[in-house]
Amino acid sequence: MSRFVKGQSGNPAGKPKGAVNPQLKMLREAADQILPTLVAEALAGNMRAVELILDRAIPRAKPQTMPEPFELPEVGLLDQVQAIMKQTAAGELSASVAGEIAALITAAGRIEEIDVLRDEVAALKAALEIRPKPREVK
């Protein structure tokens, strides 16, 4: 059996329906006076006022999805980045998608670099092991 009864508050002495924080109520009442001043400031060139208005009035841009699959050249990482730049310049890719793909290519380059360094370290270790050890001086 459930501890809670449907339709009955678990906290009958709690906040009543429709209760509003007093500070929020005050801000809502003052908004009619504040907003025209903020707009006037923005029109006068106050960039902070412009930023406040735009941040709240215009929704943030959503990341773009890749329009359709495409192949990158397998030649090298620089060629891949250049291909992305050409597609972006031609309007085939959005800048945000191009940036995400370029970040992936950069990560692949770092991984490739780590692989090369690991192989070089292994080769150096192997070379040191087969090298004759120096004789002790008496």
Image (cartoon, rainbow, N blue to C red):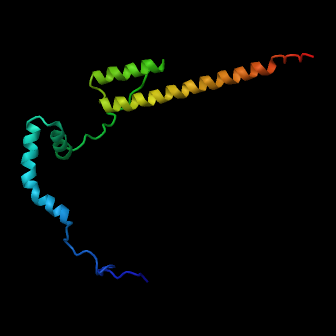
Quadrant where the C terminus sits is: top right
**Residue 43, image quadrant:** top left
Which is more toward the observer, 63 or 129? 129
Say whether residue 16 is left or right of residue 46: right
Which is more toward the observer, 108 or 68? 108
Say whether residue 18 is left or right of residue 83: left
Which is more toward the observer, 138 or 96? 138
Give the percent coordinates (x, y) of residue 53. 16, 44
**Residue 5, image quadrant:** bottom left
Give the percent coordinates (x, y) of residue 17. 21, 73
Residue that extends furthest to the right in the rendered view of this protein: 138
Residue at 7% across, 41% down: 40
Residue at 22% across, 75% down: 16
Image label count: 0
Give the percent coordinates (x, y) of residue 103. 42, 30
Q: Taking 16 as reference, is 45 above or below it?
A: above
Say whether residue 87 is left or right of residue 54: right
Give the percent coordinates (x, y) of residue 2. 41, 81
Quadrant where the N terminus sits is: bottom left
Residue at 58% across, 27% down: 114
Say whether residue 115 is left or right of residue 30: right
Q: Taking 11 as reference, is 24 above or below it?
A: above
Residue at 40% across, 27% down: 102
Which is more toward the observer, 104 or 49? 49
